[in-house]
Amino acid sequence: MAFPFLSSPRNPVRRALIALALPLLAGSAFAQAWPTKPITLVVPFPPGGPTDVASRIVAQKMSLSLKQNILVDNRSGASGTIGAAFAAKAAPDGYTFVMLATPTLLASHLYGTVPYDIFKNFTPVGTVYDLPIVMVVNPKALPSVNGLQDLIAKAKADGGKLNYTTAGAGSFGHLTTEQLKNIGKFEMQHVPYRGSAPAVTDLIGGQVPAMFSDLVAVIPHIRAGTLRPIAVGSGKRVSLLPDVKTVAEQGFPGFDATSWGGLLAPAGTPQAVVDRMSAELKKALDDKEVGEKLQSVGSFAAYGTPEQTATRMRQDFERWGKVIRDNKITNQ
């Protein structure tokens, strides 16, 4: 059906329709042309860590599909807040993104104030990976501990003096262990380290007997037999450790703790670019080879839409924020 009255350039309805259409057309044209130069992916953690390794696997695959290099820029420090603050100030032109990890999401709870607002200064692009955490023990230091209830019994028998270590105060392993202690009504003493590597080194050496760690940091030592896995924090068992029961299966129904990573863009990035980047991310994570590479280092492809990522961010921010407050955990 034709509407001759719309043909008049002075018709207010015609002008309103054009005004509405122009941004959509401009955004579509920009997305089709984008990217015309390399993209920077800020990883707010050091090279070799779980966030960095997963980011490089995914970035390499997306570079091929986008026909532009995705350059990983490691800007580590202060639970990822240094890199996140840098990305928050970047031009929202579709050429800077940041890989969010759980510690960065929760940083404002731990530090009091951070130089960005994780919800206002960023636009979610998509969830990238899940990073299961696993409770491991030194089999020489705790030879009789083969499951979570064995560890709890040992902790109670030692009057709460049994030590456990993590990658640092406020790390996801720390928060998970504290929540487990609250629910299970037992005590252990936290011995924080600066990063997973020194913590795992001393765990293997016997200076500390137990650790709730991300799977990436300990899977080689589990395979070597120098560490014994006794529980995984996620709601379901993980394929790399099919015989290891979850925390939920060992007396804590409903317990589910999984660290994860998500791709964010500076707020104001064109929606058409966010949508295309999210679609390219999904394509990369659906690739069998990418999935196998992620699993080989202890993380798992876990695409989520921008909306699902935003919901997960808010839920984890509130859940773990309560754990931080209830246990008076700080990183200041």
Image (cartoon, grey):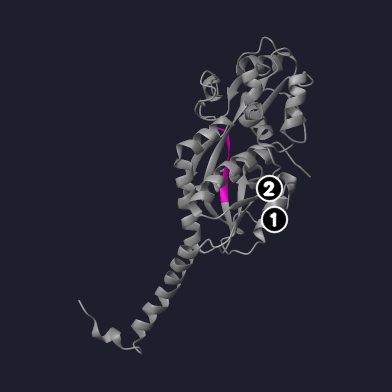
Specify the principal SS of the magenta part: strand
Which residue was labeled with disc 2? 44
Residue 85: mark in rendering: 1
Residue 287: mark in rendering: none
Residue 109 locus on image (x, y percent): 69, 46
- Tell me the magenta residue range: 256-263
> Which quadrant does the C terminus fall into?
top right
Amino acid type for the residue under numbered disc 1: Ala
In the rendered structure, which disc, 2 or 1, sits on the residue that comes first in sequence? Answer: 2
Name the foreground residue: 284 vs 105. Answer: 284
Reply yes or no: does residue 260 show up in magenta. yes
Residue 53 locus on image (x, y percent): 62, 39
Residue depicted at 58% across the width and 56% down the height:
265
Residue depicted at 75% across the width and 46% down the height:
77
Q: Residues within 10 Å of mark 1 (few under 14, many from 20)?
A: some
Name the foreground residue: 48 vs 92. Answer: 48
Reply yes or no: does residue 162 show up in magenta. no
Which residue is the extreme one toward the left? 1
Whether residue 185 appears in this view of the structure is: no
Amino acid type for the residue under numbered disc 2: Pro
* Left or right placement of residue 22 versus residue 200 in this view: left
Q: CA distance from mark 2 to mark 1?
A: 9 Å
* Left or right placement of residue 72 versus residue 281 in this view: right
Residue 106 locus on image (x, y percent): 65, 45
Badges 2 and 1: C-beta atoms under 8 Å apart?
A: no
Name the foreground residue: 329 vs 48. Answer: 48
Residue 160 locus on image (x, y percent): 74, 20
Residue 58 to residue 201: above or below: below
Q: Residues within 10 Å of mark 2 (few under 14, many from 20)?
A: many
Instruction: Please identify, in this view, whether the residue under mark 2 or under mark 1 is nearer the observer.
Output: 2
Q: Secondary structure at mark 2?
A: loop
* Left or right placement of residue 107 versus residue 147 in this view: right
